[in-house]
Amino acid sequence: MSPLFAGATCQPQNGALGEQCTLGGFPEYSVNVTSVAQIQLAVNFARMRNIRLVVRNTGHDVLGRNTGKGALSLWTHHLDDSEVMDAYDSANGSYTGPAFKMGAGVLAHEMHEAAEKHGYTAVRGGLSPVSSLYGMAADQVLSVDIITPEDHFFTADDTQSINLFWAIRGGGAATWGVATSMTVRVHEKIAVGGYAWRGKPFMIPGMALRDFKKLVQPLLDEWEALSVDPKLEFFDEDNLYSAWKKHFPTVPVGGTTARTANRLLPRKNWVDGELLKKTIKTVRSVVEDGAFLVHYNINGPKPEGASENVVNPAWRDTMMFNIIGVVWDADATEEEIATGNEKLTGDLSQRLKDISPGAGAYNNEGDLMDLEWQVSFYSQKYDRLLAIKKNIDPRDLFWAPTAVGSEGWAIGNQENVPFISQDGRLCRVSV
Ligand SMILES: Cc1cc2nc3c(=O)[nH]c(=O)nc-3n(C[C@H](O)[C@H](O)[C@H](O)COP(=O)(O)OP(=O)(O)OC[C@H]3O[C@@H](n4cnc5c(N)ncnc54)[C@H](O)[C@@H]3O)c2cc1C
């Protein structure tokens, strides 16, 4: 789990080396769940005893939504059954084709591996390298098995629990209950051509190397004219899993010295000449003023036949998914950390908002301190989401920062902190 939100106490492994650790914002107890009955028991226990409940899968969350001081934690990692179906009929008949049913604990690489083995391409995410071809991961979902906050276990799909099915596909983590498994579309196997530059890939899923080379030739020519040899390593894979395994860099899960924000910059920022100049100038200024930038030229079109869901509409029209972040030294003072974090939210992130009014941001890698998080992450669909939340979880058993309905509660001990940690009690602040 990211130590950033746990009050930056030392990590358990350091405790074993003699450091004095406190639990901080980590949960008090954790249940290694392997069955529906165990989850129901834990959900009921937490609800009836008024105990904070959190859910943790891989622990990769970058907003601290998987942990909480004094909480009971459900660890879903071992819900790892999976099934490959070559001919699946969706509940309302809108999809017939290959699908995977996966337990909530199945990992991204296991999904890719199974897809490769059975001759398919899987869309993991939120955002996946194949999203521009097939849409977001939430768009692939055909049904979800879920235990609700009131402990009911049922399947939500296009014909039953329709409101929840709409909300859960894009409507955020730690909100609707505990998902135990879901069934998702998978797609035909595709080639992936690309090159790696300094260990970082530029690749186009669905395009073989020969066509990829044609596409990038003008860029190669420009480099040659400038006598620049970028030492590219071209690759040609016949499936996504191999491309991902061999050419994607490994990324650290979380630390205590950086925080991110993002913006989905729309197509019109590239179409309108004046706006394009302003866009490039702004992105450049953000980097020159100290942020790091990670960007993807990926968007997420809605797949044909998929029912409406809550994927942020900004994904449908984005040209550049722009993640920015600030970093501070391990021995930075509280004031330095606060200054960097205020700059991220109030200045650098605001510059990107100013050049893309009406666009949005990706919650899973978003700015925890975004004051307009409801509209940034959930668009104009927020009010309907909130109504569904109040209906399915009237006691707010499921809570996390920036989750639907979270504005009614706040973590204590957060005076003058640069960003919300989970190292405090969760208290109601409004009904
Ligand atoms: C190194 C790294 C790489 C990343 N790469 C990508 C990427 O390529 N594309 C992308 O879209 N995102 C990416 N992310 C962001 C990622 O989508 C989020 O961190 C996501 O929240 C991870 O989900 P998880 O279930 O694995 O993690 P967790 O931290 O375990 O859970 C995330 C949230 O989901 C809730 N949750 C987990 N399981 C369940 C369940 N069964 N039922 C109900 N709620 C549940 C948790 O309570 C928590 O709020 C990356 C993050 C990291 C750290």
Image: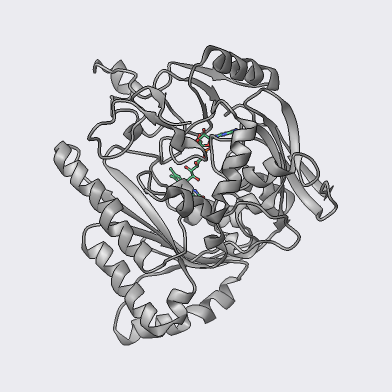
Query: From what the image shows, is residue 337 above or below residue 35?
Result: below
Q: Is the N terminus in the top left, top right, bottom left or bottom right quadrant?
A: top left
Q: Position of residue 353 (x, y in %)?
A: 37, 62
Residue found at the very far front of the displayed protein = 431
Foreground of the two, 60 or 190: 60
Left or right side of 105 for 414: left
Number of numbered labels in the structure image = 0
* Model colouring: one colour
Report the residue at 26% width, 57% height from top: 347
Residue drawn where x is 54% and y is 43% of the image: 172
> Would residue 48 appear left or right of 4 to someone viewing this image?
right
Q: Position of residue 193 (x, y in %)?
A: 55, 68
Which residue corresponds to the image point at 14% horizontal and 38% vertical from the top-left? 333
Question: Which residue occupies 36% across, 85% down?
Answer: 222
Residue 81 shows in the view: yes
Q: Residue 40's x, y, as percent?
A: 66, 19
Q: Nearer the viewer, residue 89 or 272?
A: 272
Image location (x, y in percent) of residue 137: 61, 51
